């Protein structure tokens, strides 16, 4: 867009022109208030305007200040050189002030921060020394004042400029800087009321004849209100109003202060202004800090919420994952056992089955651990405490871990407590703790190492130690190995773990009120894990201590039955037993007919799966002897290698409920279970 030359000039020099005009008007007003000898201003608002405009719109506007000051002094009759000197002083003062603020204070014209306000007060006090010094020197050298008047003129000029800056500059800064003033209608109303109240109070203080009671300090009421409620802009406006009323009162001699001197009035208002600016800044700082704090607290809460809901989701995911993976694994395990049942004897197959079996089992253990970890983290794991003998717990743990220990060629020594110790604990979990430590000892020790499990009483604690001669643990990791998923040598071949065994162990120990600690003399020098468990305060009589339940509790206990498997083929018997165990049943095995009769009479199982061809007495005979007892409670299932129909008939006629032919398949077993499940419940013996 092109402007006509005149407008272009206006656009180019508009700000200069505006500043010039404002300065001239403010200067003329200033000089109308009883200047000393006509020239030394007692009130000098122009200084505030010039400083604010230079800071807001740039130093380049300085010529406007110079020309305006020059023009004002010429217009009131000062000499050319005197006016020049005064204008120079005025210009230098605001340039120096603006430079200081921008260069050293990183001044923000919104002056909401304490540092901006303190810096502004400092500039208001120091910068006018320049203008008053140059101004008074010019007046003196021009012969306008005598040497005796220099001191008074200087201090009057100085205070007048301080006052001008303190009253006008904040007002302009605050009302001209962005963001522009924006409030709700109610806040505007409040601002209006505060300003009016300041005005009225000022009228009372400065215009009314003073009675015996000094009202000066009433001005604090509206000013404090403004400072607390209306922010920096409100207080700047209120102070400007108070100052205007105070100064204007001296026009026609209303004010008490006229008698005490305009100077004192300015000192009074200037001090008020400085104090309230700083006070407001502190209030604003606090308000902003509160807003920031609120914002940060909000953000924190939000993040926390996000983190914890993500955490919850992860825990749920883990639980579901572990649970879902267990089912196919159980099926694989069953299938392996079934394949064994097929009695396929190719050596390769047997070896392969063994490998599959081992790996699936270790995966199952990992998944079980994972499930436990997620149960603990969701507070869903409860302990079933019983009074237990530590000896038998150690035995069971050793039994569970010894295959792995032996496979790695380690020697294991066990040192039991001198006197039998009892714990009030969950046997499954204590076994889990010990097996975990023993397995780790075997896993993290090069083959053919040595492992020691020992326990003893120390005070009122049972202290169990698992020592190995293995790879050891670096000192700085001794604590970290108990953190979830932490592994010292991640990716090491022999570590087929997830890094959750120790955290789980740690949590299980803590749930028992105990502690666990790892020590190691460093790499290659073995490790020791020490578990401390509290001993019960009162020992029950030995008879009250129940026998331990067998092994880890089966997981699928729906429709669980007690089953006696009878077969002289050990591999087949154990495979079938294991298969049924996997389905959650309780299993006992007999390898010949007489043993079968004994065991059946003793334990009276729900079901007996009976091989017909047995070395001593055959299956029929076993059935006959059992049925000598009227209403013998067990359901009999025949399992034979001979598939002749007459055998089947014979078996059924002899009281077998079902008849299975070897090799049995998964389907037959399932079908048999279903049929047995619907069989009438055995009567109580
Ligand atoms: P995982 O064995 O599945 O990696 P754990 O939580 O059982 O997880 O163990 C965490 C880590 O602690 C292991 O990866 C191993 O680095 C270290 N660690 C545990 N037991 C021993 C030990 N007996 N000797 C040396 N390091 C061990």
Image: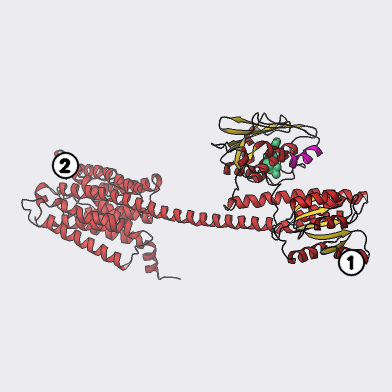
In x, y percent, where is residue 644?
A: 94, 64
* Neighbourhood count class around disc 1 (C-alpha, 10 Å): few under 14, some 14–19, many 20 upward: few
Q: Left of 76 or right of it: where is 62?
A: right
Q: Quadrant of ligand 1?
A: top right
* In this view, 469 is above or below 183: above
Q: Earlier in the sequence, mark 2 or mark 1?
A: 2
- Of helix, strand and loop, which one carries label 1? helix
Horizontal and vertical percent position of residue 396 = 71, 41
Give the quadrant of residue 652: bottom right
Which image quadrant is residue 156 in?
Answer: top left
Residue at image mark 1: 649
Q: Tell me which segment is drawn in magenta.
A: 399-418
In the displayed structure, would residue 72 be above or below residue 678?
above
Q: Position of residue 593 (x, y in %)?
A: 86, 51
Residue holding disc 2:
152
Query: Alpha carbon of mark 2 to alpha carbon of mark 1: how far?
Result: 137 Å
């Amino acid at each position: 867009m092109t402007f006509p030359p005149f407008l272009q000039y206006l656009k180019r020099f508009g700000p200069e022109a505006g500043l010039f005009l404002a300065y001239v008007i403010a200067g003329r007003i200033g000089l109308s208030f009883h200047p000393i000898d006509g020239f030394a201003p007692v009130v000098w608002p122009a200084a505030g305007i010039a400083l604010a405009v230079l800071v807001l719109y740039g130093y380049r506007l300085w010529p406007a200040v110079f020309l305006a000051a020059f023009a004002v002094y010429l217009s009131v009759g000062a000499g050319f050189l005197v006016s020049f000197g005064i204008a120079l002083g005025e210009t230098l003062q605001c340039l120096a002030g603006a430079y200081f603020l921008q260069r050293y204070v990183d001044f923000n014209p919104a002056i909401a921060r304490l540092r901006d306000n303190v810096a502004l007060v400092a500039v208001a006090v120091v910068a006018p020394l320049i203008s008053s010094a140059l101004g008074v020197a010019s007046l003196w050298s021009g012969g306008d004042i005598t040497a005796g008047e220099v001191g008074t003129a200087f201090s009057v000029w100085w205070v007048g400029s301080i006052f001008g800056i303190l009253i006008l500059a904040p007002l302009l800064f605050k009302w001209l800087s962005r963001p522009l003033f924006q409030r709700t209608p109610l806040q505007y109303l409040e601002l209006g009321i505060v300003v009016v109240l300041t005005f009225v109070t000022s009228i009372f203080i400065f215009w009314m004849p003073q009675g015996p009671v000094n009202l000066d300090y009433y001005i604090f009421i509206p000013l404090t209100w403004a400072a607390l409620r209306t922010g920096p802009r409100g207080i700047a406006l209120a102070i400007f109003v108070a100052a205007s009323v105070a100064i204007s009162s001296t026009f026609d001699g209303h004010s008490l202060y006229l008698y005490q001197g305009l100077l004192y009035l300015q000192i009074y208002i200037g001090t008020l202004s400085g104090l309230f600016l700083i006070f407001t800044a502190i209030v604003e700082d606090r308000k902003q800090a509160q807003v920031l704090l609120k914002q940060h607290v909000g953000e924190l809460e939000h993040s926390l919420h996000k983190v914890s809901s993500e955490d919850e989701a992860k825990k749920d995911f883990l639980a579901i994952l572990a649970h879902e993976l267990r089912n196919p694994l159980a099926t694989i395990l069953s299938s392996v056992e079934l394949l064994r049942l097929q009695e396929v004897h190719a050596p390769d197959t047997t070896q392969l089955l063994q490998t599959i079996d081992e790996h699936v089992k270790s995966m199952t253990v990992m998944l079980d651990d994972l499930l436990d970890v997620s149960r603990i983290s969701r507070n869903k794991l409860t302990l079933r405490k019983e009074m237990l003998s530590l000896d038998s717990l150690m035995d069971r743990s050793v039994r569970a871990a010894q295959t792995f220990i032996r496979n790695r060629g380690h020697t294991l020594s066990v040192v039991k407590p001198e006197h039998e110790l009892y714990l009030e604990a969950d046997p499954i979990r204590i076994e889990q703790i010990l097996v975990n430590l023993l397995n780790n000892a075997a896993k993290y020790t090069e083959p053919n190492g040595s492992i020691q499990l020992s326990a003893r009483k120390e005070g009122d604690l049972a202290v169990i130690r698992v020592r190995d001669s293995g790879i050891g643990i670096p000192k700085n990791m001794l604590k970290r190995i108990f953190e979830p998923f932490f592994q010292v040598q991640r990716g090491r071949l022999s570590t087929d773990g997830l890094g959750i065994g120790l955290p789980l162990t740690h949590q299980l120990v803590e749930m028992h009120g105990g502690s666990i600690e790892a020590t190691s003399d460093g790499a290659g020098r073995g490790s020791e894990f020490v578990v401390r468990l509290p001993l019960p305060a009162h020992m029950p009589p030995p008879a009250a201590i129940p026998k331990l339940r067998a092994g880890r509790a089966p997981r699928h206990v729906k429709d669980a039955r007690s089953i006696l498997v009878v077969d002289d083929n050990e591999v087949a018997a154990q495979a079938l037993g294991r298969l049924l165990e996997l389905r959650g049943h309780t299993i006992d095995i007999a390898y010949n007919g007489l043993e079968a009769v004994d065991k059946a009479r003793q334990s009276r199982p729900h079901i007996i799966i009976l091989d017909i061809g047995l070395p001593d007495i055959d299956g029929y005979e076993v059935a006959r002897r059992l049925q000598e007892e009227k209403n013998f409670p067990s359901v009999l299932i025949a399992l034979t290698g001979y598939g002749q129909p007459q055998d089947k008939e014979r078996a059924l006629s002899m009281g077998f409920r079902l008849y299975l032919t070897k090799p049995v398949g998964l389907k037959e077993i399932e079908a048999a279970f279903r049929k047995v499940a619907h069989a009438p419940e055995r009567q109580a013996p």
